[in-house]
Amino acid sequence: MPQTIYEKYGGFSAISRVVMTFYEMALESDQIGDYFADVDMARLIDHQTKFISSLLGGPAAFSDERLEAVHRALGITHEDFDEMAALLKEALEQHGLSEPDVRTTLTAIEAKRNIIVTRNAA
């Protein structure tokens, strides 16, 4: 049986480290940092780790409806999504994911763009 990306890199704890690195960068981002003001970061990191894990073959599952509901009120733009993807790519690379595995991960995230982005930039 082929190994999932989730399994290949060490499961939940490894994905959690990637997500923590991502949020360290996201909090410093002029583009998306404000989205995280007054957010329970420990809870968000846990949820995001489960979400990324699910995209990479891990045990968690998130419905598109739930994903849309969580992001609907945030007013996320395509530019915000692009910044998120760029920072996630950097975090994945920092944690040693291969180029094909980074590409697979970003493709899985890109497939959720139309659910997460709720408005066009002004």
Image (cartoon, helix red, strand yellow):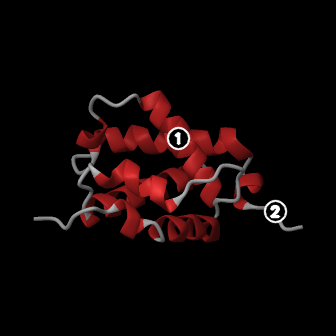
Q: How many residues crowd around disc 1 within 10 Å: few (fewer than 14), some, or many (20 or more)?
A: some
Residue extending farthest to the right is 1
Look at the picture and state if 41 lies above or below 115. Answer: above
Q: Quadrant of residue 101?
A: bottom right
Is label 2 in a helix, a strand or a loop? loop
**Could you tell me if residue 72 is visible in this image?**
yes
- Farthest residue toward the left? 122
Residue at image mark 2: 3
Residue 2, how many percent across, how many down?
Answer: 84, 68
Q: Residue 76 lies in what quarter of the image?
A: bottom left
Tag 2: residue type? Gln
Q: Quadrant of the N terminus?
A: bottom right
Q: Specify whether 66 is left or right of 96.
A: left
- Residue 96 in view (yes/no): no
| Residue 37 percent coordinates (x, y) | 27, 33
The residue under label 1 is 47
Label at residue 11:
none
The amino acid type, in three-letter code, at marker 1 is His
Q: Nearer the viewer, residue 53 or 61?
A: 61
Dot 2 surroundings within 10 Å: few (below 14), some, or many (20 or more)? few
Which comes sooner in the sequence, label 1 or label 2?
2
